[in-house]
Image: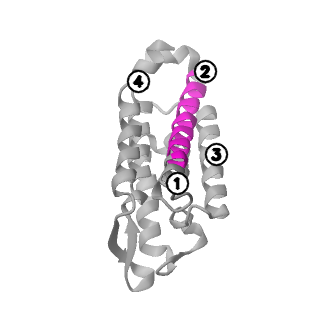
Amino acid sequence: MTLWARCRRATTTLPAGCAAAFVLVLLLGGTAVPLPALTLGGSATVQVGQFVPVVMAAVLALCLDTRVPAAEASGIRKIRRMDAALVVGVIALLTLAGALTAFALDEAFTHPLWTLGRNTACAAGLLLLARPRLGRAAVMVPVALVFCVILFGYRLPTDPYPWGFILEPATSPLAASACVVTAAAGVVTHVLAVKKEEL
């Protein structure tokens, strides 16, 4: 397990990524930037915090891609379960830290930190769902989702279509359910998938 933690950078890169994501959303998450929204015929105002879960998915992908194939070949199922636990742990940590901080700031359900864990669950789930087929290129799937949602996901300036649930407020049961289902599907896929050999 020590070798696995070292290979997955679970004590170096991953904690640094979680801390950076938390600080970014804490300091800049509420900052809004105008981006093109084709369905609105103009631009939409998007919080910077919407992009941080994509960065966390990239950090997770980096950690999961750091492996020792010879050592892992004999126990691939166990290793995959440990990888899945690592992903779930990151999601839980960001969700808990975000919620507690939002409460401490007296901005429960409104501070962007409240949705950090939720949207990271979605990004990580998409990453894991795509990895068996796309390999390392799967890291682009959460990126594509975010930009598709921004470009095509708004029906009104403050009202996304249901499929653009990552833009929904923290109180949205649809967004919470969709992100949990996506994360769960990704974790199960990762555990059961046949290892994709990288060329």
The Cα–Cα distance between marks 3 and 2, rounded to whole angstroms, is 18 Å
**Which mark sits nearer the N-terminus, 3 or 2?**
2
Give 113 or 187, whichever is nearer the viewer. Answer: 113
Identify the residue under disc 2: 78
Residue 74's spot in the image, x, y percent?
A: 55, 14
**Helix, strand or loop at mark 4:** loop
Density class for disc 4 (Cα within 10 Å; few <14, some 14-19, many ≥20) is: few
Q: Is residue 81 rendered to the left or right of residue 38?
A: right
**Which mark sits nearer the N-terminus, 4 or 3?**
4
The Cα–Cα distance between marks 1 and 2, rounded to whole angstroms, is 32 Å
What is the tally of numbered marks visible in this picture?
A: 4
Identify the residue under disc 4: 11
Specify start and end residues of the magenta stretch as a single range.
79-100
The reply to whether discs 1 and 4 touch (Cβ–Cβ < 8 Å) is no
Residue 36's spot in the image, x, y percent?
A: 34, 76
Q: Amino acid at mark 1?
A: Trp
The Cα–Cα distance between marks 1 and 3, rounded to whole angstroms, is 22 Å
Give 194 or 156, whichever is nearer the viewer. Answer: 156
Identify the residue at image location x=59%, y=43%. Answer: 186
**Helix, strand or loop at mark 3:** helix
Density class for disc 2 (Cα within 10 Å; few <14, some 14-19, many ≥20) is: few
The reply to whether discs 2 and 4 touch (Cβ–Cβ < 8 Å) is no
Q: Amino acid at mark 2?
A: Lys
Front disc: 1 or 3:
1
Front disc: 1 or 2:
1
Front disc: 2 or 4:
4
Identify the residue at image location x=45%, y=81%. Answer: 39
